[in-house]
Image: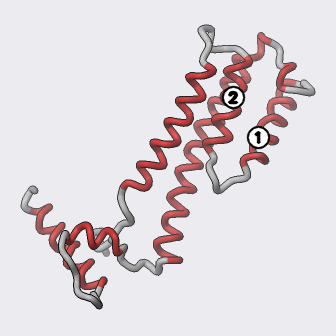
Amino acid sequence: MSDGSNIIPFPPSQKQVAQRVHTALVSYFESLAKPEAHRDKQYLLALLQTIGLSVGDDVDTSGCRLHLHNRLKVHFNVHSIDEIPEEQLPAAIALLEKIREDAREFSIMMYELNFAFRREVVGGGEPWIPWIKRSLGRDVSSRPDWRALASEVARERRTQGSCGT
């Protein structure tokens, strides 16, 4: 059973950058639409926009938008989301906030799946050369054995970790 220490990651900041961009976009659209009452149609429209952004590039966002509009129209028995009565806006907003959270979780899951596919299937599980070069901090030979270098880096990391550094 592997302890996971022999796994050579892609640049570790990719996922963090994607999550930061997602959070910034959602915050930006929420800040544009958040009214004092927090329950008006502008906020509803902003939620629709953020849900579309939450699903990312792996999903047909125009199809998501169509399904969101359809769900609201069916749920509230209207022809257009603009027709949702004011007294039902809190329920519509609650529904969209739940969908937005689900879309965010789906987006993260898709990112992780895409990352694993690229690393394991396309990349064949081979060590990530830019990470090895950064970790070594020195020049390598003209025909390096990248797997051996990756093992060396992993050994150094384990040794450093066991010394508490």
Q: How crowded is mark 1: few (under 14 residues within 10 Å), some or many (20 or more)?
A: some
The residue that label 2 is drawn on is 95
N-terminal of the two: label 1 or label 2? 1
Single out the residue that lies furthest toward the right: 79
| Count of all numbered marks drawn on residues in the image | 2
Residue at (81% x, 41% y) in the render:
66
Q: Quadrant of the N terminus?
A: bottom left
Question: Residue 12, how many percent across, how many down?
Answer: 35, 58
Colour scheme of the rendered structure: secondary structure
Estimate how packed mark 2 is, as few (under 14), some (14 to 19) or many (20 or more) residues with alpha carbons within 10 Å.
Answer: few
Q: How far apart are marks 1 and 2 (CA)?
A: 14 Å
Compared across the picture, whether 92 is left or right of 81 comes to left
The answer to which image quadrant residue 77 occupies is: top right
Task: Name the residue type under label 2.
Answer: Leu
Q: Which of the two residues, 42 or 125, is positioned nearer the viewer here?
A: 42
Task: Report the disc number at residue 21.
Answer: none
Above/below status of 44 relative to 87: below
Question: Residue 150 location, x and y as percent?
Answer: 27, 77
Report the residue that reaches farthest toward the bottom: 143
Helix, strand or loop at mark 2 = helix
Residue type highlighted by circle 1 = Arg
Q: Which quadrant, please, contains the C terminus? A: bottom left
Q: Mark 1 points at which residue?
A: 65
Residue 45: where, in percent of width, then height?
Answer: 72, 26
Asked if marks 1 and 2 touch (Cβ < 8 Å), the reply is no
Q: In this view, does 123 lie to the left or right of 110?
A: left
- Residue depicted at x 55% and y 63%: 114
Q: Look at the picture and state if 36 lies above or below 113.
A: above
